[in-house]
Amino acid sequence: HIYSQGRAANKNLLRRRHLSSSSTQAAGGSSSSAIFGKIFFPSLCAITFTLGTWQTKRYFEKIDMVQKRKDDLSLDPLSFEQWRLLNHPTISNLDGASSS
């Protein structure tokens, strides 16, 4: 007897859900929200994927930059003349004497 009451209640609930969903579809309220959902959700997925891809790329760029800095720090120091020639190859005389 209790089992049959539970089944009857489930049938009534299903009938109400079916009626409410068919009435909103007939009124046209659900179609605009369905279109919005079909556009909005995939765009969120695309944005999330793009940001994740960008973050991954940026992460590996930073790892490479840190490794390059570590490698640079492990090198022997340059003398001032070596540094000047590397950074300013066109300046040949640093003592202030002009060539005119």
Image: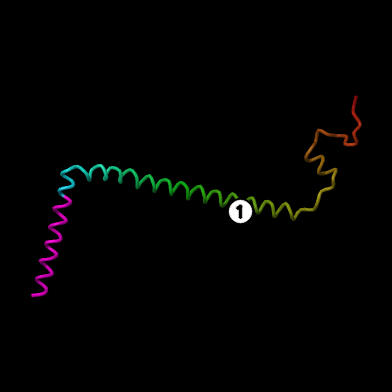
Residue at the extreme top: 100
The magenta stretch spans which residues? 1-21
Left or right: where does residue 88 sit relative to residue 19?
Answer: right
- Residue 21 vs 6, above or below: the answer is above
Work out whether residue 14 or residue 62 is closer to the camera in this orientation and state it. Answer: 14
Q: Position of residue 42 (x, y in %)?
A: 35, 46
- Residue 10 vs 38, above or below: the answer is below
Residue 10 within the magenta-colored segment of the rendering: yes
* Rendered image coloring scheme: rainbow
Count of numbered circles in the view: 1
Residue at 69% across, 55% down: 70
Residue at 52% across, 51% down: 56
Left or right: where does residue 100 sit relative to residue 19?
Answer: right
- The dominant secondary structure in magenta is helix
Which residue is tagged 1?
A: 63
The kind of residue on which mark 1 rests is Ile
Q: Position of residue 30 (x, y in %)?
A: 22, 45
Residue 44 within the magenta-colored segment of the rendering: no
Residue at 17% across, 43% down: 27
Q: Position of residue 4 (x, y in %)?
A: 9, 71
Question: In what element is the residue under mark 1?
Answer: helix
Work out whether residue 97 or residue 90 is closer to the camera in this orientation and state it. Answer: 97
- Residue 98 vs 8, above or below: the answer is above
Left or right: where does residue 35 sit relative to residue 57?
Answer: left
The C terminus sits in image quarter? top right
Work out whether residue 3 or residue 74 is closer to the camera in this orientation and state it. Answer: 3
Residue at 12% across, 66% down: 9
Mark 1 residue crowding within 10 angstroms, few (<14) / some (14–19) / many (20+): few
Left or right: where does residue 92 sit relative to residue 58?
Answer: right
The N terminus sits in image quarter? bottom left
